[in-house]
Image: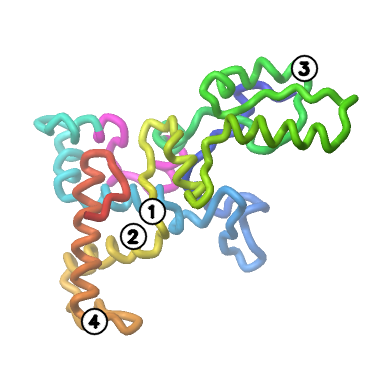
Amino acid sequence: MTTRSQLPVRFMGKHPLFGKTKRTRDASGGIKRTEAGVPYDKSPYYWWWRALQLSETYQQVCKSKGRNANAALAKVYADFGDVFTQSFEVWWRANGARLFGEPPAPMTVRTLELDEVETIRETVDTKQTLLVAIPLFLTKREIATAVRKIVAKNHSGKRGRSSVATRQAKSHALYKLKHFKGIEPIARALTVVEQKRAGVMMKTLMKDGEDAPSVSRARRMGEAIIKNVERGVFPVTR
């Protein structure tokens, strides 16, 4: 039997892995990705945390423990806390599911035992899960046809629209990820901001055939991401 508390917490983005289990550690000692998770520095949630760390405004809020902050910053501080006093792993284990997790729900299509139905009631009420009765005296073709019709009626995914965007539109997380195409440009933008603040020369910042305008665009993008996490939104790049 699977109780409600045993249902896994879902995340709209790939959640961070730290290589602490046999399943997430490869032979060389590195961290390998799973279907739902990636090495922590490839996860959008890591870069959300890093963007907050790069916010000089948020740093001052943390030093004052949220006092004298505007309403938006005070709320972010109340939810995210001081991101400067602990590692990302420690912070994530304490806060990740609370801030970014979706309500626990079944993660695969499977049959249910009768005593499991009650455990997923909330996920049915929030339209994350669909209960279907399948009479097994019908033919396989009849069942398949009926299931297709039910899914078409109840699933909001549309042809040509990203399945990720469709899922994100239904997010129940306290803090919802905005849709983004890839984590690499975000990581690059925030890294450029950090290096530029450390006094790294423009010529050194250029890599892989980049020119100065490209680096400048990355820096502006990074500054925009940082400014937007101060109001609890990520990743907004403008």
The mark found on residue 211 in the picture is: 4
Where's residue 196, x and y in %? 19, 69
Q: Disc 2 and disc 1: Cα gap in Å?
A: 9 Å
| Magenta residue span | 76-94
- Residue type at numbered disc 3: Leu
User: Which of the image's four quarters has the N terminus?
Assistant: top right
The chief SS type of the magenta part is helix
- Residue type at numbered disc 2: Ile
Q: Disc 4 and disc 1: Cα gap in Å?
A: 24 Å
Badge 1 local density, few (<14 within 10 Å), some, or many (20+)? Answer: some
In magenta stretch: residue 46: no
The residue identified by callout 1 is: 180
The residue identified by callout 3 is: 114
State the residue at coordinates (17%, 40%).
63
Lower position in the chain sequence, tag 2 or tag 3: 3
Please name which of the two marks, 2 or 1, marks the residue nearer to the observer: 1
Lower position in the chain sequence, tag 1 or tag 3: 3
**Dot 1: what SS?**
loop
State the residue at coordinates (39%, 41%).
91
**Dot 3: what SS?**
helix
**Dot 4: what SS?**
loop
